[in-house]
Amino acid sequence: MSLGLIPRVRVNYTFSDLLKAMFTSGKRRVVLQQCEAFFSDFFEREHVCLTPSARDAIYEVLVRLPQKKVLVPAYTCIAVVEAVKLANKEIVFCDTDTRTFNANYTEKITPDSIVLATHQYGLPCKIEEIAKKCKETGAVLIEDCATSMGTTINGKKTGTFGDYAVVSFNASKLYNVPPAGGVLVSKNKEMVERIKREADWKPSDFKFKVKSMIRGLAFVMTKNNFVYKLFHYLTIESKGKLQKTEHEKPAETKTDLYNYAFTEWQARILYKQLQRTDYIFERRKQLYPFYDQGITTALVKKPVVDDNAVCCRYAIQTENRNEFYRRCVAKGVDMDFSHCSLGCPDSYKPEHEVADRILNLPFYVSLSDKEVKKVIGVVNSIANEQQSI
């Protein structure tokens, strides 16, 4: 049994970042405006709004649009389904290509629809085709770039094709802010101003700030493989679970991920990471081919490779996933489970089959080359062991 455990996620921020943020006033907006300016420049747009979460960014746009139908991938994060339902819109699920994890929207796009086009795991969907159909029909296009910031298509960045785009800052994304955060970028100045003026966001009070800092501190402490192993045992393994939210369902009312305005102390944690964007992109683009070339067993289905993608996941598929996962943990490698709970009906069988097979390998910028080699060795050895049984 391994003495340590490679975490499924590691955040970019440090204890020092949390300490500085703790003593940052929430009333100022200097660093927050610097963050907004960064995203405005990056996405070649003028209009930016930092939000409590990416799901809230989606919600804030949807509740202000007149269209009633929202096209959503059948294979997607439950948070997306939650945001659409809370906005009181009709969900139209779209079939997913189980090789690329992205949906086919074009046949269902109508003038009265909103297309929520997801670049799943950072791999780009057919956004040029989707944008063309939306323009022809008058449908609204929102790009879900929660995991794809930095990905390009023919030299054009994801997030610049649609009317709106959203990015996430939770613990598994390119940038991490406790307890979460997101950004909305838009070609529509009036919409962004309306959201900033009308959104029912509370200011970050002391209780929320302390709660967020404790959560952030837990993530910082569990960067250490030995501390993480203890944490994993106490919160997951000892309870007979595979992850803390195995059967997640959409919230029926707005939670803190919708309620608290993104504030200056969070912006301070974020801005330091924004200054390292080139390195974050470069390192993630290095990790993907390391895994692709190193995993050689045919018993694991590897994701597609796109040299122009900056991915937030390296998602493998394997039979007997739960047993495979437990054996990997026993050898010192933890993994994440993407979208175990889907909001689509059971009739979407391919999507549910993917949800039952998928595992996300550790994939973050602080993952060392030595750790990458260990992950590859464990994956190959476990697959070979399963074959021999």
Image: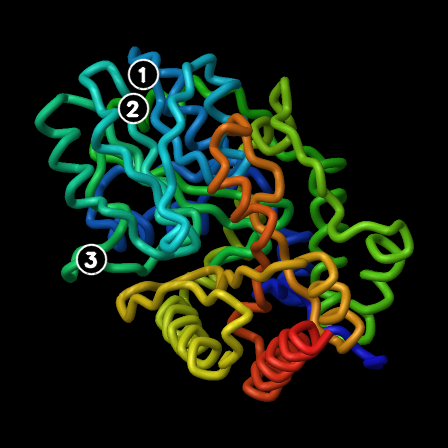
At a point 53% along the width and 36% down the height, the residue shown is: 52
- CA gap between label 3 and label 2 equals 22 Å
Tell me: 206 left or right of 64: right
- CA gap between label 1 and label 3 equals 28 Å
Q: Which residue is mark 3?
A: 153
Assess whether mark 3 and mark 1 are in contact (beta carbons under 8 angstroms): no
At a point 82% along the width and 54% down the height, the residue shown is: 236
Q: Nearer the viewer, residue 145 or 325?
A: 325
Residue 273 at least partly seen: yes
Assess whether mark 1 and mark 2 are in contact (beta carbons under 8 angstroms): yes
Q: Nearer the viewer, mark 2 or mark 1?
A: 2
Residue type at mark 3?
A: Ile
Q: Which residue is mark 1?
A: 65
Residue 100: x %, y % from top left = 36, 54
Sequence order check: which comes first, mark 3 or mark 2?
Answer: 2
> Dot 1, crowdedness within 10 Å: few (<14), some or many (≥20)?
few
Q: Which residue is mark 2?
A: 114
Numbered tag placed on residue 223 in the rendering = none
